[in-house]
Image: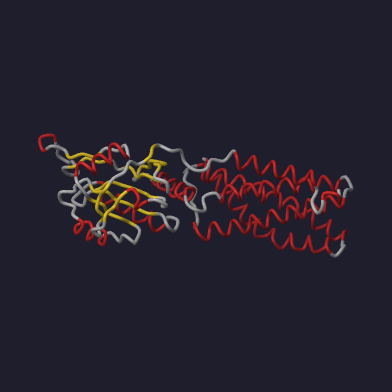
């Protein structure tokens, strides 16, 4: 096997195929629902606001009006919390359905009153343009209710959807989420992360974990067959794969932060139990791997074998559960 250099050809081939399988069977984010049409409106700071304003940004959108006495205050509060938790660079847009009253000045005050941060636009314009954008562009309800049709208990003179909409950096609508459902809001944050500039890294991480697991198992089978040099090469490749995973993992979470599991009930309990065991053993495995590798490097093979009996199954478990955690968090 020296002819192929430092790594075992069979091990690396299997690891590559396993990693490719994980990567290719994972979705690159939520489905596409439609492309936003061009529009020309006005932001709360008085500047023009068009589709091009949002190019290159992942955007979370809602429709409200400042005089609303029903759903709008809660929607705006949810948007503020989402902005605080969303990956850096995520934009937020609140379109008014009451442009006759919601001038840029009114919207600016509304933004201040609700703690809107930079990167959250409140947008007005002509009523026909706003309603056309809502109904034809976002496929949401937005209309003024004639006075004769209004009922007691209505939020106000305007009817609009309480959905939150996710738009990707190219202007495609990628999801609709119930603003009142905590599970939907968590799923929205997860999907926004997948559409961001670091959105491919979870798939990369899962693929590296899959490669590590396959290389570790190949290494075990090789040493059981007495093929020491190939075992060494396979384990070195597993170590490299795990190191790349750790680097990618740290980069992803440094820029995106923590992603909460969206589901509730027994599925959440299962996920958390796997995550806790995975995290605890991932921390413990680092010194174990270091000691195991050091003993092999110093040719202390009997001591190496003793600790490897502990290190190997834990390392495989951490790698396999890394794939499971990814699948549960990003694919369910």
Residue 157, quarter of picture? top left
Where residue 268 sits: x, y (%)?
A: 51, 45
Q: Residue at (42%, 52%) from the top-left corner?
A: 56
Residue nearest the viewer, comparing 261 with 146: 146
Residue nearest the viewer, comparing 199 with 299: 199
Where residue 240 sits: x, y (%)?
A: 71, 56
**In this rendering, would 292 be left or right of 158?**
right
Residue nearest the viewer, comparing 292 with 274: 292
Residue 118, quarter of picture? bottom left
Where residue 206 sits: x, y (%)?
A: 61, 47
Residue 297, quarter of picture? bottom right
Where residue 211 sits: x, y (%)?
A: 69, 47
Q: Residue furthest top?
A: 149
**In this rendering, would 291 be left or right of 278?**
right
User: How many badges with numbers are in the image?
Assistant: 0
What colour-coding does the image apply?
Answer: secondary structure
Q: Residue furthest left?
A: 148
Q: Is residue 277 above or below residue 31?
A: below
Q: Residue furthest right?
A: 226
Q: Is residue 252 above or below residue 126?
A: below
């Amino acid at each position: 096997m020296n002819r192929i250099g430092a790594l075992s050809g069979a091990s690396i081939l299997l690891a590559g195929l396993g990693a490719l399988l994980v990567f290719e069977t994972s979705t690159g984010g939520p489905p596409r629902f439609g492309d936003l049409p061009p529009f020309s409106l006005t932001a709360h700071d008085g500047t023009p606001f068009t589709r091009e304003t949002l190019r290159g940004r992942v955007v979370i959108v809602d429709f409200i009006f400042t005089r609303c006495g029903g759903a709008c205050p809660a929607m705006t509060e949810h948007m503020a919390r989402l902005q605080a938790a969303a990956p850096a660079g995520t934009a937020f847009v609140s379109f008014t359905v009451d442009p006759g009253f919601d001038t840029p000045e009114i919207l600016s005050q509304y933004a201040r009153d609700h703690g809107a941060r930079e990167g959250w636009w409140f947008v007005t314009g002509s009523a026909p343009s706003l309603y056309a954008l809502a109904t034809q562009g976002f496929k949401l309800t937005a209309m003024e209710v004639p006075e004769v049709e209004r009922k007691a208990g209505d939020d106000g003179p305007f009817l609009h959807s309480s959905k939150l909409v996710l738009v990707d950096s190219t202007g495609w609508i990628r999801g609709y989420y119930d603003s009142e459902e905590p599970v939907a809001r968590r799923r929205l944050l997860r999907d926004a992360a997948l559409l961001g500039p670091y959105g491919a890294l979870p798939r990369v991480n899962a693929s590296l974990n899959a490669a590590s697991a396959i290389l570790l198992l190949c290494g075990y089978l090789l040493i059981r067959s007495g093929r020491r040099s190939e075992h060494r090469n396979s384990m070195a490749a597993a170590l490299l794969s795990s190191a790349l995973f750790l680097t990618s993992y740290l980069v992803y979470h440094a820029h995106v932060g923590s992603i909460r599991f969206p589901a509730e009930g027994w599925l959440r309990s299962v996920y958390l139990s796997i995550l806790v065991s995975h995290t605890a053993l991932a921390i413990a495995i680092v010194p174990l791997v270091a000691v195991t590798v050091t003993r092999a490097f110093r040719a202390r093979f009997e001591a190496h074998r003793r600790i490897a009996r502990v290190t190997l199954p834990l390392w495989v478990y951490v790698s396999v559960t890394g794939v499971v955690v990814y699948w549960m968090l990003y694919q369910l």
